[in-house]
Image: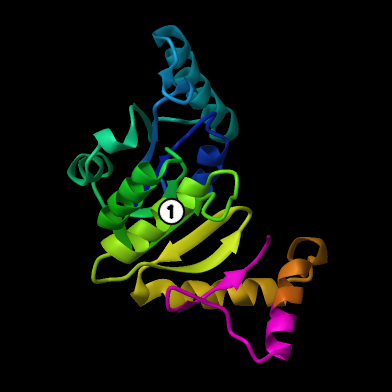
């Protein structure tokens, strides 16, 4: 059990999918500044409509949005104590996809680290996206300068998202991801990952990232 948090909700599509990993007692919290464009917030009426549409999307998918709370604002305006009090627990899954400048990314990852449960997962978006290089900069500033003693590290990369976990559970998630890919008979989904694994094994190479085993599932 534990809360689920998305920093950067947009229209709520990924947020709705996250319900698959939630139990009835879990709180789903989304944070978004609802900008019209970078640095320009939506007018109040359009912001309210955007939030209403997110709730509508979740209701459409799940039939109930009572466990959901959408917070309006920049992620840098929220602290760990406030978010933990809203979830009544640490978070078992956190999606980081809000501000794409280095300062915000570094802040959001540090915030996620503080509120992540021992077996929780962080999904960080756009880490290797060349269109938003400051995301990469912010990630490595956090990884090199800020990470705490528990050393959150990556275990898989899939669909433009880097998945990370604390050291005590990282290897379990890597093994699960590896077994899922290699045992699957759905070739059109995991074939590229299987090709990556086969090539690495033929070269006696085990990819690592920040000191942990790392699985590239998709480009």
Crowd around label 1: few <14 · some 14–19 · many ≥20 (10 Å): some
**Residue nearest the viewer, comparing 186 with 202:** 202
Q: Position of residue 12 (x, y in %)?
A: 52, 32
Q: Residue at x 28, y 49 (%)?
A: 111
In the image, is residue 85 part of the stretch drawn in magenta? no
Q: Position of residue 145 (x, y in %)?
A: 28, 62
Q: Residue furthest right?
A: 188
**In this picture, which residue range is highlighted in magenta?**
197-219
Instruction: State whether residue 172 appears in this view.
Output: yes
Vertically, is 118 above or below 56? below
Picture quarter containing residue 171?
bottom left
Its colouring scheme is: rainbow
Q: Residue at x 41, y 56 (%)?
A: 139
Instruction: State whether residue 25 appears in this view.
Output: no
**Residue nearest the viewer, comparing 121 with 3:** 121
Total numbered badges shown on the rendered structure: 1
Q: Residue at x 68, y 60 (%)?
A: 219
* Residue to which mark 1 is pinned: 137
Q: Position of residue 196 (x, y in %)?
A: 71, 75
**Residue nearest the viewer, comparing 205 with 6:** 205
Instruction: Give the quarter of the figure containing the N terminus.
Output: bottom left
In the image, is residue 215 part of the stretch drawn in magenta? yes
Q: Residue at x 25, y 39 (%)?
A: 86
């Amino acid at each position: 059990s534990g809360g689920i948090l998305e920093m950067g909700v947009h229209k709520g599509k990924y947020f709705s999918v996250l319900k698959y990993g939630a139990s009835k007692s879990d709180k789903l919290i989304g944070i978004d500044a609802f900008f019209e464009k970078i640095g320009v917030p939506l007018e109040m009426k359009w912001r309210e409509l955007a939030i209403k549409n997110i709730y509508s999307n979740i209701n459409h998918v799940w039939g109930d949005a009572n466990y959901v709370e959408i917070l309006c604002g920049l992620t840098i305006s929220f602290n760990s104590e406030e978010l933990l009090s809203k979830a009544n627990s640490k978070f078992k899954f956190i999606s980081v996809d809000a501000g794409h400048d280095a300062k915000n990314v570094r802040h959001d990852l540090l915030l996620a680290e503080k509120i992540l449960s021992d077996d929780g997962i962080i999904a960080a978006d756009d880490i290797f996206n060349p269109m938003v290089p400051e995301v990469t900069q912010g990630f490595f500033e956090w990884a090199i300068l800020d990470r705490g003693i528990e050393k959150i590290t990556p275990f898989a990369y899939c669909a433009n998202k880097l998945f990370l976990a604390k050291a005590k559970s990282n290897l379990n998630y890597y093994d699960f991801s590896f077994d899922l890919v290699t045992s699957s008979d759905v070739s059109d989904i995991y074939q590229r990952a299987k090709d990556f694994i086969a090539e690495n094994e033929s070269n006696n190479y085990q990819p690592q990232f920040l000191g942990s085993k790392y699985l590239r599932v998709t480009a």
